[in-house]
Image (cartoon, grey):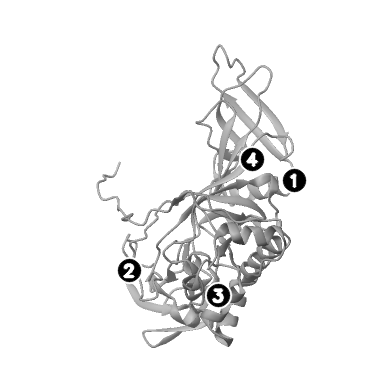
Amino acid sequence: MRTIAEINDKISRKSAVVWTVEELKARVAQSSVAQAAKEVDVITTGTFEPMESSGAIINLGHTDPPIKIRRCWMDNVPVYSGFGAVDLYLGATQPTEAMDGEEMRDRGGGHVIADLIAGLPVQVKALGQVTDCYPRASFETTITRETINQFYLFNPRNLYQNFIVGVNGGERPLFTYLGPLQPRLNNAVYSNPGAISPLLNDPDLQLIGIGTKIFLGGGVGYVAWEGTQHFPLQKRLPNRTPVGPAATLALIGDAKQMSNRWVRGCYFKSYGPSLMLGVGIPLPVLNEEVIARCAVQDKDLVAPIVDFSIPRRVRPTFGLVSYAQLKSGQITIDGKAVRTAPLASMYLSLQVAQELKQWIEAGQFTLTEPVAPIASDRAFLPQDRWTEF
């Protein structure tokens, strides 16, 4: 029906028809897939949720005399410095170190990244390896995003295509990456926003590939590669959506363009810091199949209920549950009513899709052709060869 070039021409003339994925689902319910395909050019998806496998590349610029940084802290958060002399990587889940060396777990790398994006000052302390070309041994300074060179997010794993529902069948509270799980199945927590989630609307990644242009943290970003733990071979329903964690993406984007509305540090009690991140992906309507995939409803998507009280890599499950059931606020496990809550903000996820829609309608955001597909044959390899030390 259409090509990306034709859609971009309409975007440049501000005549493209753009719907959020929520609007698309409502239109299909009122009319049909075929009718919707005739009307719309682009569908926008979005999510706002914790994405802990995220971080920022930062280049400080050289001091005089220059330094080869080998240990570094930003607001007392350790920063990886095993690159070039003043190239650094600030991980979102790296916790703050107190002055006595003990970790302060209520703040970490995600908060420092968010502060820099907000334009706030951040204290830097660095120790160097003294060499003939880098004679300086240490320095301390204060930086902002305006006083450093490169500052961009490079996130090894974002946008899980589906995930799990966490519960706790044990006798004591558990503090996890899904937040607190109460004992004796007293709550259930899920993280994926379901039918509005980007990758569940393109389940075989036919539209999304390396080089796809996206909304990242309120700025422009791109799909850089498959994400870590990318598992496209996950079992799937007849509608091609996976029954558990499947595809993931590695994302990159200029943090100097981003907004602290869409990038926020967060903290999970007794687990650690992370990063809340808004990501939106536009899906070009090239044919009717695109509409059929995007018409999927929460009742047609499922996730596994996993018991975190068993401290193993493979934990027992209580079967599958639909996202419609999860979003109702209550599911039933072994005959017991269990209250549910999402980690993702449904409201802000929809706002990401809405903002991306406005960018496209205004002619400010065009689409890109992927330069290569995301791998579709990756197995998930466990680490079974290990010893204690």
Q: What is the spatial separation of the Cα atoms under label 1 and label 3, in whole angstroms? A: 43 Å
User: Which residue does the image show at 66% across and 16% down from the upper left?
Assistant: 65
In terms of image quadrants, where is residue 137? top right
User: Circle 1 sits in a helix, a strand or a loop, which is it?
Assistant: loop
The residue tagged 4 is 151
First in residue order: circle 1 vs circle 4: 1
Q: Which residue is mark 1?
A: 119
> Is 316 positioned to the left or the right of 296 in the image?
left
Q: Quadrant of the C terminus?
A: top left
> In this picture, is 17 found above or below 105?
below
| Mark 2 or mark 4: whose residue is earlier in sequence | 4
- Disc 2 designates what residue? 235
Pointer 1: residues within 10 angstroms few (<14), some, or many (20+)?
Answer: some
Dot 4: within a 10 Å radius of its alpha carbon, few (fewer than 14), some, or many (20 or more) residues? Answer: many
Q: Residue at x 62, y 23 (%)?
A: 138
**Identity of the residue drawn at 66% across and 70% down:** 17
Percent from the top left, x then y, of residue 270? 52, 58
What is the C-alpha distance between the residues marked 3 and 4?
40 Å
Q: Is residue 204 above or below residue 317?
A: above
Residue indicated by mark 3: 37
Closer to the camera: disc 1 or disc 4?
A: 4
> Left of 159 or right of it: where is 380?
left
> In the drawing, what numbered circle is on residue 74?
none
Tell me if label 1 and label 3 are in contact, CB under 8 Å: no
